[in-house]
């Protein structure tokens, strides 16, 4: 969907799926009673949206002209930790490629609570339908607040190059927030023993657990390791088994 003009937060959390009735702010179902200071410092004071009983019906899906802000509001579960790592993935769908456009392109930056997590990427026709994923970052590093009430915002900012022959709009297919490595399956990729040292590598995000037998009891390896994980192997040590478990 598209809107007419631009608007500051909080926007309208009841956008209908009718053209020109979406706005810059899209809300997932949640409770929005607390503005995060970093967002207020950037966007100016605003009254939070309160209770949003269901996901909005429509989201604005394009940058166009001077309308270059797409903001996504959401709560984060209280069960998370601020040390948890996340990443943002987005995909550009289409691009203004009119006959008079010399070099069709659009820039895009990504912010989480006004912290830049993806410096500008230039999207040209060859980069359409490509998944772009930010480097992992911790929730603490982006001013995240956990639990109901906190108005966390992921902000996609478009950069228009129409004055330099770049075209006047670009459509966004989707934007997604995942645990770091969340787009990869949780599985072991290798296990090696060298010079009395066992090394395990894996993809995805989860807890590494060990047990003396394949039936358990299983115990989480502490402190929580990341891939690759290595430990010394004792010659007189009985068998040890490892598994990965999603949180």
Image: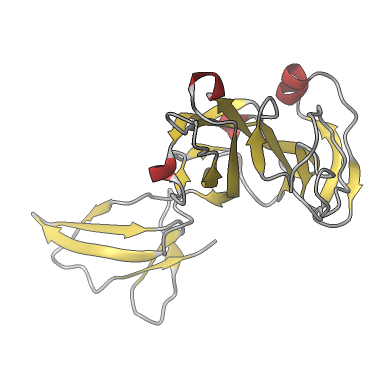
Residue 71 higher or lower than 231, as above or below? above
Q: Is residue 168 left or right of residue 120?
A: right
Q: In this orientation, does residue 64 appear? A: yes
Q: Say which residue appears at 70% left-offset and 51% top-offset.
A: 77
Which residue lies most toward the front here?
99
Front-lying residue, 49 or 180 = 49
Residue 152 higher or lower than 222, as above or below? above
Rendering coords of residue 74 (x, y %): 74, 45
Q: Is residue 203 left or right of residue 145?
A: left
Residue 58 higher or lower than 7, as above or below? below
Rendering coords of residue 61 (x, y %): 67, 45
Instruction: Place residue 151 in its image quadrant.
Output: top right
Front-lying residue, 214 or 38 = 38
Rendering coords of residue 186 (x, y %): 41, 64
- Tally the marks: 0
Q: Say which residue appears at 85% left-offset and 35% top-offset.
A: 11
Which residue lies most toward the left here?
195
Instruction: Place residue 150 in its image quadrant.
Output: top right
Residue 67 higher or lower than 150, as above or below? above
- Colour approach in the figure: secondary structure
Q: Is residue 127 left or right of residue 153?
A: left
Q: Say which residue appears at 32% left-offset and 59% top-offset.
A: 202
Rendering coords of residue 185 (x, y %): 41, 64
**Quarter containing the C terminus:** bottom right
Front-lying residue, 98 or 133 = 98
Q: In this orientation, does residue 145 appear? A: no
Q: Is residue 130 left or right of residue 163?
A: left
């Amino acid at each position: 969907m598209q809107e007419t003009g631009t608007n500051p937060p909080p926007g309208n959390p009841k956008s209908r799926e009718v053209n020109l009735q979406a706005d810059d702010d899209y809300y997932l179902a949640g409770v929005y009673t607390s503005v995060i200071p970093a967002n207020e410092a950037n966007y100016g004071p605003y009254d939070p949206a309160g209770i949003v009983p269901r996901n909005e019906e429509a989201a604005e899906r394009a940058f166009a002209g001077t309308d270059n802000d797409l903001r996504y509001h959401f709560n984060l579960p209280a069960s998370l930790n601020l040390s948890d790592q996340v990443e943002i993935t987005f995909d550009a769908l289409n691009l203004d490629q009119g006959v008079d456009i010399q070099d069709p392109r659009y820039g895009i930056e990504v912010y989480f609570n006004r912290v830049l997590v993806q410096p500008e990427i230039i999207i040209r026709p060859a980069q359409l339908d490509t998944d772009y994923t930010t480097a992992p970052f911790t929730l603490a590093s982006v001013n995240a607040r956990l639990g109901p009430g906190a108005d966390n915002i992921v902000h996609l900012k478009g950069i228009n190059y129409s004055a330099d022959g770049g075209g006047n709009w670009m459509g966004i297919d989707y934007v997604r927030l995942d645990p770091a490595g969340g787009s990869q399956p949780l599985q072991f990729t290798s296990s090696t023993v060298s010079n009395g040292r066992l090394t395990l590598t894996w993809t995805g995000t989860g807890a590494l657990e060990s047990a003396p037998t394949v039936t358990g009891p299983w115990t989480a390896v502490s402190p929580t390791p990341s891939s690759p994980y290595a430990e010394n192997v004792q010659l007189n040590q009985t068998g040890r088994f490892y598994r990965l478990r999603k949180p």
